[in-house]
């Protein structure tokens, strides 16, 4: 929670997308390097060694690789989109749309993997697009998102 002396962060223009940085670097950077190393090692094997692999073994490795790629893509595509109509939360392969008035609070506790949004129906949902591992960047994103929620959920009576 920001201290009162910190003031309110400037509003970001809408539409604005909040994405995790560290997770995307890990998925695309390290995932790409892993694929490259695997391909180089495969082609570095002599043909006699490559011939000893059965189609089932090759298929298993390819299946696992595609599964890991699908999981990584799900994490990398996670985001929080702030739009005029409200918030769109993309967690992996699930998409949730909320009106501004449905979002009561956004928190990011120390050590939490991602931000959490408290909703007006009494439930909470993780916002995987704002990852705690991003450190100060994640804290800034939560503050910006809080300011957007406050600004866009005001009523004439401001209750």
Image: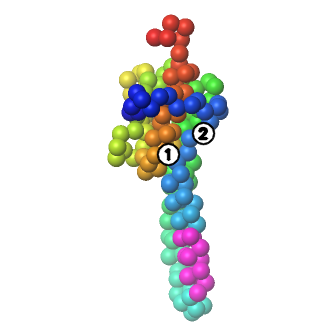
Q: In terms of secondary structure, what is the magenta stretch mainly?
A: helix
Residue at 47 percent across and 43 percent down: it is 138
Tell me the residue that label 1 is attached to: 137
In which quarter of the view is residue 73 placed? bottom right
Label 1: few (<14), some or many (≥20) within 10 Å? some
Above/below status of 158 relative to 29: above
Residue at 52 percent across and 48 percent down: it is 20
Q: Position of residue 149 (x, y in %)?
A: 52, 25
Residue 38 falls within the magenta-colored stretch:
yes
Residue 89 falls within the magenta-colored stretch:
no
Considering depth in this image, is 2 or 83 the residue closer to the camera?
Answer: 2
Q: Secondary structure at mark 2?
A: strand
| Coloring applied to the structure | rainbow
Q: Find residue 84 and name its label.
A: none
Can residue 118 be seen here?
A: no
Tally of numbered discs: 2
Which residues make up the magenta segment? 33-44
Tell me the residue that label 2 is attached to: 17
Considering depth in this image, is 143 or 58 the residue closer to the camera?
Answer: 143
Q: Position of residue 111 (x, y in %)?
A: 34, 47
Q: Secondary structure at mark 1?
A: helix
Asked whether, in this view, residue 19 is left or right of residue 108, the answer is right
Q: Position of residue 159 (x, y in %)?
A: 46, 11
Can residue 33 be seen here?
A: yes
In which quarter of the view is residue 44 placed? bottom right
Residue at 48 percent across and 34 percent down: it is 143
Above/below status of 6 relative to 92: above
Above/below status of 95 relative to 21: above
Q: Quadrant of the N terminus?
A: top left
């Amino acid at each position: 929670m920001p201290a009162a002396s910190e003031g309110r962060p400037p509003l970001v223009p809408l539409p604005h997308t909040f994405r995790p940085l560290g997770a995307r670097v890990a998925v695309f950077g390290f995932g790409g390097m892993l694929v490259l190393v695997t391909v180089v090692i495969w082609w570095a094997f002599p043909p006699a060694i490559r011939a000893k692999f059965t189609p089932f073994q090759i298929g298993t490795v390819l299946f696992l690789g595609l599964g890991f790629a699908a999981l990584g893509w799900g994490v990398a595509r996670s985001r929080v989109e702030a739009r005029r109509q409200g918030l769109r939360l993309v967690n992996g392969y699930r998409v949730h749309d909320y009106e501004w008035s449905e979002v009561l609070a956004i928190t990011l506790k120390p050590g939490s993997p991602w931000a959490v949004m408290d909703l007006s129906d009494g439930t909470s949902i993780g916002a995987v697009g704002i990852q705690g591992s991003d450190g100060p960047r994640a804290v800034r994103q939560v503050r910006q998102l809080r300011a957007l929620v406050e600004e866009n959920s005001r009523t004439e009576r401001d209750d």
